[in-house]
Image (spheres, rainbow, N blue to C red):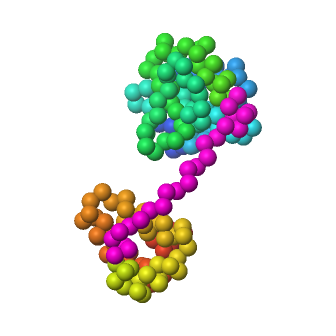
Amino acid sequence: MEPIADKKHVWDKMNNWEEEILFLKTIIDKTELIETVKWGAPVYVFNKKNVIGIGGFKDYFAIWFYNGVFLKDEKKKLINAQEDKTKSLRQWRFTSKEDVNEKEVLEYIVEAIENEKQGKVLKPAKKEAIISELLNKEMNQNKDLAEAFQKFTPYKQYEFLEYIETAKQEKTKLTRLEKIIPMILEGIGLNDKYR
């Protein structure tokens, strides 16, 4: 692997944990995974699929398992960094080299590779239909708005509904509704300017 000359893509916290990261690498090198670099961090792949990544953070260094949700985790080592957002990724955090039990780490990695071979992947959940009473009320009172809304693809309709309904407060929902009514009437999708 060529040395990383391009400093801005280097994972900035790696240096705090250089020795520990190298130690993890020696363990991972005993498996059939192939090391690549993605997003500035070492990512290990099997059949071009991401299996694990390693990296240093401010207070810990970690191995993350891209499909960690399928690991048995009998030793209760894995955590989900973002409960509601992260579906399949799981992290195993360490705060010192002594925390790393090579035998256990290898067991988890071998299981992760096995899961990859079996093609265990989390299928994205079907999106729940969203109902916006506020928008419905507006459309009942304004025929043009209702007709304009119907002209959008289901995906774009969903974006509008999600935009209104993800607001926590009623006040914010109303502000968002006011913002999108002219867009709907003009046939402009919520995210058209970014597409």
* Residue ranking furthest to the left: 171
The answer to whether residue 22 of the structure is visible from this angle is no
Q: Residue at x 63, y 19 (%)?
A: 107
- The reply to whether residue 142 is visible in this rendering is yes
Q: Is residue 62 within the magenta segment?
A: no
Asked if residue 115 is among those painted magenta in the image, a careful observer would answer yes
Towards the viewer: 146 or 96: 146
Left or right, 112 with respect to 19, comes to: right
Location of residue 172 in the rendering, given as x and y in whole percent from the top left corner: 28, 64
Give above or below for 163 relative to 122: below
Q: Is residue 28 left or right of residue 7?
A: right
The C terminus lies in quadrant: bottom right
As rendered, which of 1 and 191 lies closer to the eye? 191
In the rendered view, tell whether residue 83 sits above or below residue 151. Answer: above
Comparing 35 with 51, the one in front is 51
Residue at screen point 47% across, 78% down: 149
Q: Residue at x 43, y 20 (%)?
A: 95
User: Which secondary structure class fits the magenta region best?
Assistant: loop
Residue 72 versus residue 118 in the image, above or below: above
Which image quadrant is residue 9 in? Answer: top right
User: Magenta segment range?
Assistant: 114-137
The quarter of the picture where the N terminus appears is top right
Query: How far across and down, in percent of the image, does residue 81 sit?
Result: 44, 36
Residue 67 in the image, given as x and y percentages of width and height? 60, 36
Residue 136 x, y percent position in the rendering: 38, 74
Residue 64 left/right relative to 1: left
